[in-house]
Amino acid sequence: MRRGLLAFEVVALAFAAGPGYAQMAHAEEPPDLTPAQIRDMARSAHTPEQYTQLADYYQARRRMYVKKASETMDLWARRNAVITPLNEKWPRPVDSARDLYDYYLHQAAKSAATAQRYSNLANNAGRQ
């Protein structure tokens, strides 16, 4: 139930982001920025362009996590097909693949929410 709800949230946030992020559709991975650089950008942002740059970064990061989740879903399906109950070890490889899939979906949802927040800040800063 939780996994289905989280997947729905990711898809809903992806559609809610809308065409504003169409310019970065070609970029697969976020720009090579360190966490310290992102923190500095977030602290010093006050113009719509700076907020848009942060929103684009988090949107690219969301796409990266969704791509990783889909790759992990394939791994999960392959591992799920090979279960042998006689000499199974715990945690099972299928469990670790499922946990990794859930982690990627969670990170994608967090990135989408952060991108939406910065997009809203860019819109509000543009009005002032």
Image: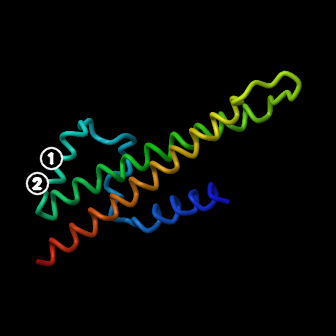
How far across and how far down the image is residue 12, in percent?
51, 66
Tell me the crowding category of disc 2: few under 14, some 14 to 19, or many 20 or more residues within 10 angstroms, Cα based.
Answer: few
Along the horizontal axis of the image, is 6 left or right of 46?
A: right
How far across and how far down the image is residue 57, in percent?
29, 49
Along the horizontal axis of the image, is 117 left or right of 73?
A: left
Tell me the crowding category of disc 1: few under 14, some 14 to 19, or many 20 or more residues within 10 angstroms, Cα based.
Answer: few
- Give the quarter of the figure containing the C terminus: bottom left
Give the amino acid at mark 2: Ser
At a point 85% along the width and 27% down the height, the residue shown is: 84
How far across and how far down the image is residue 47, in percent?
11, 63
| Vertical arrangement, residue 50 with respect to residue 32, above or below | below
- Give the quarter of the figure containing the N terminus: bottom right
Give the amino acid at mark 1: Asp
Residue that lies at the very extreme toward the top in this rendered image: 87
Q: Which residue is mark 1?
A: 40
How far across and how far down the image is residue 114, in percent?
34, 58
Residue that lies at the very extreme toward the bottom in this rendered image: 127
C-alpha separation, residue under disc 2 versus residue under disc 1 = 6 Å
Residue 44 disc label: 2
At a point 75% along the width and 24% down the height, the residue shown is: 89
Please tell me whether mark 2 sits on a helix, a strand or a loop: helix
* Image marks 2 and 1: residues in contact by CB distance under 8 Å: yes
Front position in the image: 89 or 98: 89
Q: How is the image coloured?
A: rainbow
Q: Quadrant of residue 2?
A: bottom right
Front position in the image: 115 or 56: 115
